[in-house]
Amino acid sequence: MRELTFAEVDRDGALLEAVAGVAGTTRAELLRCAALGSAAALAALAAPEVAQGSPRGRERDGEILNYGLAFEYMQAGFYTEAESLGTIGRMPREQRRWARTLGAHERAHVRIIKEVLGEKAVKRPFFDYRGVTENPENFTRTAVALEDLTVALLGGQAPRVADRNLRAAFFSLLTVEARHAAWARRIVGFRPVGAPLDEPKSLAAVDRVVRSTRFLVSRPRTSGRKDPRFTG
Amino acid sequence: MSEPSDRRRRRKFLAALTVLLAAVGLAVAAGVYVPSSSNGGEAEAAAAPDPSRGALPVVPDPVEPAFVPPKPKALAGVRHVSRFSPVRRAVTARAEPDLASRAVAVLAARTPEGTRNIVPVLGRERAPDGSLWLRVRLPVLPNNTVGWVPRDALGGYGAVRTRLVVDLQRLTATLYRSGRPILAADVGVGRAEWPTPRGEFYIRNRLTKYANPFYGPIAFGTSARSDVLTDWPAGGFVGIHGTNRPDLLPGRVSHGCIRLRNEDILRLARLMRVGTPVTIR
């Protein structure tokens, strides 16, 4: 199967905008790197530290929050779709409790981050979960991957947050997501803890994982400007 | 007798000397310890609390988080949620969830207006070979046709909580959200010779900024098709749109389309998303 480029996966640019902001570069520069498929180039855009209270610090914090919001959208949508399609309802009781709890948590995370960002919050992207929300086994295994990815993402970004109160909130999210990951791992029979240390992932590494899921897709274009030819 | 008494005296002297040396040794040891303790300073004393006294180390309080998520909520009822999905590639819709089943219609990836074709998802079923099929409403004649398509021919799910009901008797359109009416407007519908079709349909696109004032500022394309104007350009689809003749509303004035006053279509456009189911009764 042909591998999609980042640009094809993220046509709306929601994730790209967030990555561009965190990496401290322009969307065009990042798109150029992504189009080249160069993970090393993405990694080279690693952001320098910024001081708490500085204008750039506040801006960076907003960008990291938006980056987190894009992932929370993906997670919340994942659990919500599986529940509304009845997939979770068909799972054994303990798994149902796990999936519904995590879905409710992820929706709460989306609500609070959107509220904090206000008008600066990125729009909810369009997701195509490729059928994994319609099969209990695929759903639970993918949930493990998503929770582990979120832990790695927050572990990488939380120390970069300039505002210490916001950083504290990020670490609180991180510990909850780590518990989610452990619970998800237990549900599918994996060891709750893999290594003795969780390795934070770089943006480039997260990008590769997101690209491999192909969950983030272009919103279907259902608006046009052609002259109507309806019966009138 | 003098020798034993001398021995006793010597023993007493040695015992007293031993006690004295032991006392001096203890005193010296205590003398060494005390300065060492006092030289440690306050920081050391604070960092190494005496567990017997239950003292806590002096460290800063935790940092107050900038935000606390609200109480998690269970998913609200999905009774009023309608799902739709974009057509990823042209596909033959079939009467049953089986490739060998009778073909009902060919579903195009694009509409005549060039937008992405979407279909409402009415049901799901897994075929004996394990593949997933979706039951969808089709934008074809006869109206109200449904068929089955393989899941992989469609994209991700979109969801809406709105529903539009057009009453051909009362000449009204009512928009509901989560089962509650949120907008009502007078409409113009098809004349007796070009009736607006009845049944279950959906909004599949939205056109704006076109040049033709006949359709007002916004026109929604629906999946409904005229049963009589079958040779109409682009297939005779019924639209929901504004008008340049508001004086004719409400009434039976159109070729089958549903006309609203421009202010009403603008209000509707703010509240109704593509994918919304439409009942014409």
Image (cartoon, coloured by chain):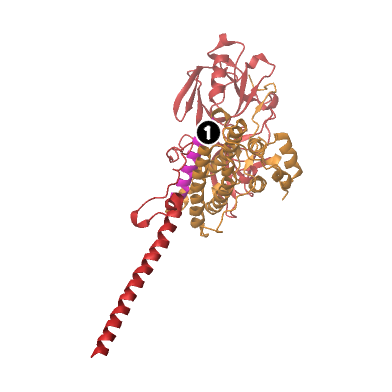
Residue at figure coordinates x 39%, y 50% from the top left: B56
* Amino acid bearing label 1: Lys
Residue at figure coordinates x 34%, y 54% from the top left: B53
Q: In this picture, is A31 found above or below B225?
A: below
Front residue of B19/A105: it is B19
Q: Main secondary structure of the magenta part?
A: helix
Furthest-right residue in view?
A: A36
- Chain B painted colour: red
Please check the rendered image and state whether residue A224 is part of the magenta-colored stretch, yes or no.
no
Q: Name the residue that disc number 1 marks.
A: A114
Q: Which residues are magenta?
A: A97-117
In the displayed structure, does residue A24 sit left or right of residue A195? right
Residue A217 horizontal/vertical position (percent): 64, 39
Instruction: Indicate the secondary structure of the residue bearing disc 1.
Output: helix
Residue B207 horizontal/vertical position (percent): 65, 23
Which chain is depicted orange? Answer: A
Front residue of A135/B256: it is A135
Q: In this picture, is A191 found above or below B20?
A: above
Disc 1: host chain? A
